[in-house]
Image (spheres, rainbow, N blue to C red):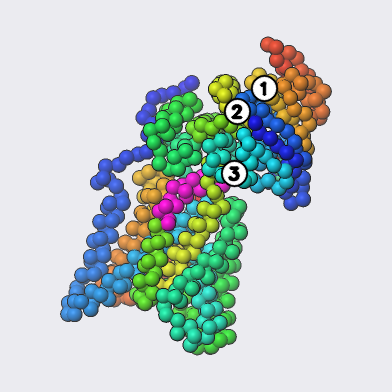
Amino acid sequence: MSDTVIAPSQTQRRFPLWRNPILWLFLLLILSCAMWLFQGISGNYDFILMLRAKKLGALICVGAAVAVSTVIFQTVSANRILTPSIMGFDALYVMMQTLLVASLGVAGFAALASAPKFLLETGLMTGLALALFGTLLHRGARDIARMILTGVILGTLFRAGSGLLARLMDPNAYATVQSVSFANFARAQTDVLSIAAVVTALALAAAIWLGPRLDVLALGRERAISLGLPHARIVILALVLVAILVSVSTALVGPVAFFGLIVAGLAHMISNHMTGGARHRVLLPVSALVAITILVVGQTVFERLLGQQATLSVVIEFAGGLFFLWLLLKGKIR
Amino acid sequence: MIEIKNVSYAIGGAKILQDINTVIPKGSVTALIGPNGAGKSSLLNLIGRIEPLQTGTIDVDGQNVTTSHSGRLARTMAFLGQHTAVASRLRVSELVAFGRWPHCHGRPGPEDHEKVADAIAQFSLRGLADRFLDELSGGQAQRAHLAMTFAQDTPWVLLDEPLNNLDMAHSRILMRKLSDLRDAGKSVVIVVHDLNQAAAWADHLVAMKHGRVVVSGAPDEVLTPDWLSALYDTEVQVLRYADRPLVLSHV
Ligand SMILES: Nc1ncnc2c1ncn2[C@@H]1O[C@H](COP(=O)(O)OP(=O)(O)OP(=O)(O)O)[C@@H](O)[C@H]1O
Ligand SMILES: [Mg+2]
């Protein structure tokens, strides 16, 4: 046989520590966090630090949640172009919030403490997302074009649903719904921060546990089943995590449409370079680190240097939108 | 032994399999033969629990494929489908290493590394181990998938048209490996179109047509002009060579 040339067959590529991108990304993140916390600080140190730390916490939660939910969703739906937001996950969350206000009444809703409110919303969101996307993904959705179309339709439907509900209950509330239909990183809802942080941490731990199983899932349904992976159960668990993480980021800063797409794309590039394959134990932390760093650095630049509090999300979404178009045009949908 | 009892299968009203009752013996190489669309892949998918059963039961060594623990079944049988493409971008060595998943669940030990290296060597993939799958020729990729299935190291091996894309030499090597597996006490089920490969290497044949088992038995009983002509709706001659049937169908 012609190709029995002896070559080192490595089943795992080991990198020296200093060449490990996770280490560098982590250092970069520490640096950017320090800059965010201490840049130009003067006057009432304690107060300002507290304020900045809270915002930082929100950015960390949002970055990790968006990145990890996108990577998981892309693996489950076997493509690199769809994200939970493109499929309408966060629009669903916003609609559900509106629904809760409508059914409990504005006063009743306000009376709920933020933590139980958040948990209630997240729970409902998870159930709804499972019912909707579980059936869609159960058979391993192969037709990406149909999925995109479905996502666009669902997203529009949910947004229209929240708009309609808001108008019905109170014309003034319509403005509120409108204002939450775009992300704002500067005005993070820090009242739910602590509960959101706990939920995020738990979901991330589950995601890391899921990592090697996602590697098997990525082989495709047939392979995964023949290797003994409880395919349907893993898909459901993955979707639950996605729904929870989307709830976290949407509750904190509102819907972010294309951010996850950029982050997942970058993370795949870095992890391909590192391991040569989609190893989720690498991919998930890398994506989270990349996302948080972009948010923290971006927010520092826009808020402190340019004095533009609310611009970051617009810039990110614009760049993400271009990236989405580029992926579509290049046909890189797998 | 694989026991298939009263298995019928339909997709959207179309009857794909109808009332299949057959036994696939342990410790032998069994070939599923039959024309395109006969239902061979559908039956193999049901045995490999890739699709859920609608009616009837299938037991592999006494394990019901519907109710048994999927992880345990993955240590009983390895399955390679007709369409082998995988979604993720992988190197050959990574793909083959996935064959060990049922045994190590992502934490390979020395034995797993050994089995992977062995499977890579067996399919002469050593020089290609660090290449990505999409950088291989059709036959090389097929060998990588086969190596993964072999690395799974199970008592049963189910292969759907494993000779796809393989050249003459590699086809013969594969068939010999399958008979070596049988000699080592394992059992093999393959779907093949090349009846002479079936005649040369299989101990048991199951012939299917229109979703039914037409005939099953030893190669000498099944590979007769009458059965084959009926099976494929075309004139087929059968000679004998080296004490085995030799099927002539190309002229
Ligand atoms: N997903 C599907 N939906 C509808 N019909 C299907 C589907 N998959 C297979 N079939 C039909 O089921 C029948 C059996 O298909 P199967 O793949 O089992 O045939 P096969 O014997 O493996 O054929 P081949 O030798 O061409 O691989 C065919 O008529 C095919 O058209
Ligand atoms: Mg077939």
First-in-chain label (2 vs 3): 3
Chain bearing tag 3 is B
- Residue B178 is situated, as x and y percent measured from the top left of the image, at 58, 24
In the rendered image, the vertical position of residue B77 relative to residue A255, given as above or below: above
Q: Is residue A109 magenta?
A: no
User: Residue B187 got which mark?
Assistant: 2
Chain bearing tag 1 is B
Instruction: Kindly state the secondary structure of the residue where label 1 is placed.
Output: loop
Amino acid type, label 1: Asp
Q: Is residue A214 magenta?
A: yes
- Write down the region rendered in magenta: A206-221
Q: Nearer the viewer, residue B14 or A267?
A: B14
Q: Residues within 10 Å of mark 2 (few under 14, many from 20)?
A: many
Report, in whole angstroms, how far the alpha carbon at label 2 lies from the one at label 3.
Answer: 19 Å
Residue B171 visible at all: no
Chain bearing tag 2 is B
Residue B77 falls in image quadrant: top right
In the rendered image, the vertical position of residue A241 relative to residue A115, given as above or below: above
Image quadrant holding the N terminus of chain B, namely top right
Q: Nearer the viewer, residue A11 or A325?
A: A11
Amino acid type, label 2: Ser
